[in-house]
Image (cartoon, helix red, strand yellow):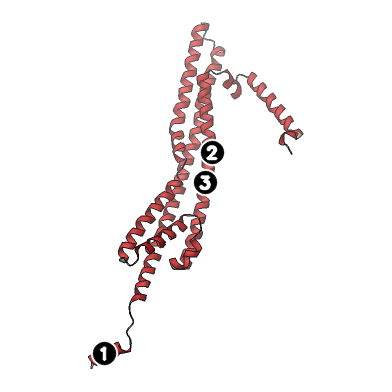
Amino acid sequence: MNFLDIPNVYEIRAELLAWLSQAGQDHMSPVGMYLAADIVVKSVMVSLAVASVLVWAIFVARVVLLTLARRRLARNYRALDRAGTLEVAEARFRKRRGVMGAMVRVALAERQRSGTAPDGGIKERAESALSRIEVGAARSQQRGSALLAITGSTAPFVGLFGTVWGIMNSFISIAETNTTNLAVVAPGIAEALLATAIGLVAAIPAVIFYNLLARMLGGYKVMLGDASALVQRTLSRDLDMSVQNRVPQPGPFGDVLRQQAAE
């Protein structure tokens, strides 16, 4: 079934075209002011409108991805805490995606590679590897934040540039028409001020979204630190338990010697 075959689509399309045509004839409407502006002001308006759409898209995507990552990390944290040892958790996290699974696999791999090396060195190397995973996970959640910061800091000035350019054209038209009638120059000034308005529409949400994401990311970094600490504690516990299992237990002959020494 083709979407264009639906009768309502043609009606909506016709109504939209009629609305755009009517709005274009009204020079005081946003569409009319955009159509009447010159190429420079139009470019500023289009770039700011695109930036505004990207700001909203990045914010929604980041919030969804960050929320899912936090839930998955919390769920895996509880799973490892219940497991108690890395060996028990190995089967659970062998193919599980996420930061916690990567941390568990790295700790197990480091322990296997080290063999009979001192436990202190194993812990240091595992801590270094876990810190890199922690930093990488936090960096992956920061994608797109730079665009929010850039838009929030530069969009008002870009809009102001469009406003200055439009007002300059209005003064040029005043000089060419040799009249100071406000009705003649008002449309050009309104077109110029529209650029600043679009710049503020793009900048204000960008600043708010950037601060919200920074706050959410700070909480996620704390959760990553807790997850790394849990893996390190579990690895340390496993190493200590393995040392205790390797200590030879005294046999009957050793008990007799200790008894004779005591006598």
Q: Distance between the residues labelled 1 and 2?
A: 79 Å
* Label drawn at residue 257: 1
Q: Could you tell which of marks 1 and 2 lies nearer the N-terminus?
A: 2
State which tag comes first along the sequence, 1 or 3: 3
| Distance between the alpha carbons at the discs numbered 3 and 2 | 11 Å
Q: How far apart are marks 1 and 3 (CA)?
A: 69 Å
Please provide percent x and percent y for residue 172.
Answer: 48, 11
Location of mark 3 (residue): 63
Q: Please, which residue is most extreme toward the top here?
A: 178
Q: What residue type is labelled 2?
A: Trp
Viewed as shown, does residue 182 lie left or right of 20? left
Q: Is mark 2 on a helix, strand or loop?
A: helix
Residue type, label 3: Val
Disc 1 on helix, strand or loop? Answer: helix
Circle on res. 228: none
What residue is disc 2 on? 56
